[in-house]
Amino acid sequence: MPEQALKPEIKLRQFEGPLDLLLHLIEKNDVDIYDIPISTITAQYMDYIESMKEFDMELASDFLVMGATLVSIKSRMMLPGMQAALGGNGEDVIDPREELVISLMRYKRCRVFAQDLKERRDKFDGARFRYASTAKQLGISLKPAEQIFDIEEFNDAVALINERNEQRFTDISAKITHILQRDKRSVKERIKSIWRSITGKGKILFSSLFGKKAEKMDKVVSFLAILELVRDNKVTVEQERNFGEISIEEKKG
């Protein structure tokens, strides 16, 4: 099916996350999840993101990160020879969409499981179960089984469980600490920060706005802040080649 023929009507509604929105678009377009028409899906996804701009930026952050990922995949798909390579055997070529497809399949599987659990809950909600009959009620005579208990094996098992739990809780604690310490600057705050950095210097590089270990969200917020400065006619941006460094210059006058 040609990409230009895929023009579904997308109505604004709440999605659980970016993968939920992508699956909605793929199912709406009735396309193969293993051969996603990335240009069409990216365009429709960005249209939805545009409609979300009136909402809280923090709530839209995950959608923005996925939008940047889609644009990156689309750019790699447009590289010279990529389509021809994917159309052939493609043994030595990694499809830029591969990781996205894997993530979508995992999410789709979880969604199927969740739907199954919901149907089970709806089906058995309010059901009443009787207690199991006792051996005496059933007229059965029970003979106690011989108990074989090794205290050393028991202690070893308890020690192993404690060790696993300690490591698990340590990892969870580290992740929670990382999340709480993340910088949650808004686009407006980032605009002020970038403007202070560029004022008086004339020109700076986009990569100089954050360190090498910056998170994706920080880069996305910085990029959106620069777009706002361009729209306000305060700066000009220039990129000499595809995927090259972006220079930002204060606009005079």
Image (cartoon, rainbow, N blue to C red):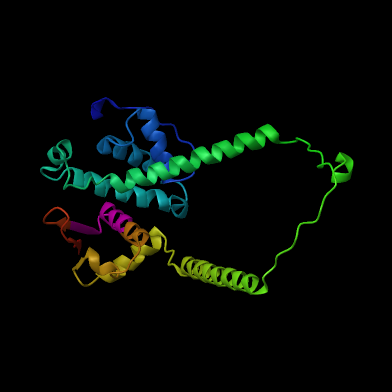
Quadrant in which residue 95 is drawn? top left
- Quarter holding the C terminus? bottom left
**Quadrant into which the N terminus falls:** top left
Give the percent coordinates (x, y) of residue 19.
41, 44
Q: Is residue 74 left or right of residue 240?
A: right
Residue at position x 55%, y 41% from top? 114
Residue drawn 14% across the image and 52% down it: 242
Viewer-closest of 145 and 114:
145
Q: Is residue 61 above or below residue 106?
A: below
- The magenta stretch is 223-237
Residue 227 magenta? yes
* Residue at 59% across, 68% down: 161
For the image, the number of numbered tags is 0
Q: Specify whether 31 is left or right of 200.
A: right
* Residue 222 occupies quadrant: bottom left
Asked whether residue 14 appears in the rendered view, the answer is no
Residue 168 on image: x %, y %:
53, 67
Q: Residue at x 27, y 44 (%)?
A: 97
Evaluate whether residue 220 shows in this view: yes
